Image (cartoon, rainbow, N blue to C red):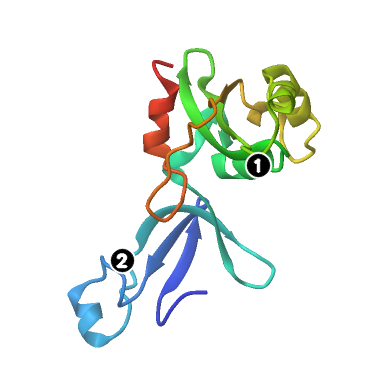
Amino acid sequence: KPFGDTEIMLQNGTLHLRGTQIGGTSSEAASSGQPSSDSWFDTGDLGRMDQQGRWIIEARRDDLILSGGNNISPLRLEQAIAQHQTIEAVIVLGVDDTEWGQRVVAIVEPNPTTDESTLQAALHPVALDTWIKKQKNIHSYERPKEWIILPEGKTIPRTAIGKLARKEARALLGDR
């Protein structure tokens, strides 16, 4: 829910804010204590309102993958893939592709408590492709075209607060 006099507007799926505490309001509006009617701040966040009237942030616009004319939310795909029992963490990135614009690549950090033979079988690309096809909430165009399985001891980079670090994770892609 918005704080204080902050207003939220959804425009083309992107959240915009305005209010006296939001940068970009006019000095006249700030001195009067009223939000400026023409100073909306584009957050770059894609979101929606749930049935209880709460705003849900679903992804960053810059993180969207555009593949074959389809917008793919990496966060939604990561949440689905993370349900796999042998996956500790996953990050989904878009990689430039001459045919599709971008292709979906999933970098997987295996669950360290799973034995090696189970990991090798379950995290084989064919096994992962078969598993992801069975997920009812994942469209065929969203499925990863490539799976990168990190070796034992290697992890997906994270920020200081534990969030997956997308920019740093790109280094794991090498020259792709």
Quadrant location of residue 23?
bottom left
Which residue is at a point 69% across and 27% down the rendered structure image? 119
Residue at numbered disc 1: 82
Which residue is at a point 30% across and 74% down the rendered structure image? 36
Work out how far the residue at label 2 is from the one at label 1, CA to CA, in angstroms: 39 Å
Task: Looking at the picture, tell me which residue is in the foreground, 27 or 132.
Answer: 132
**Dot 2: element:** loop
Which residue is at a point 66% across and 28% down the rendered structure image? 143
Above/below status of 135 relative to 24: above
Amino acid marked by disc 2 = Ser
Earlier along the polypeptide chain: callout 2 or callout 1?
2
Say whether residue 113 is left or right of residue 164: right
Which residue is at a point 28% across and 86% down the rendered structure image? 33
Question: Percent x, y for residue 130?
Answer: 78, 24
Residue at numbered disc 2: 39
Quadrant location of residue 41?
bottom left
Task: Looking at the picture, tell me which residue is in the foreground, 42 or 158.
Answer: 158
Looking at the rendered image, the quarter that the C terminus falls into is top left
Above/below status of 4 relative to 58: below
Q: How many marks?
A: 2
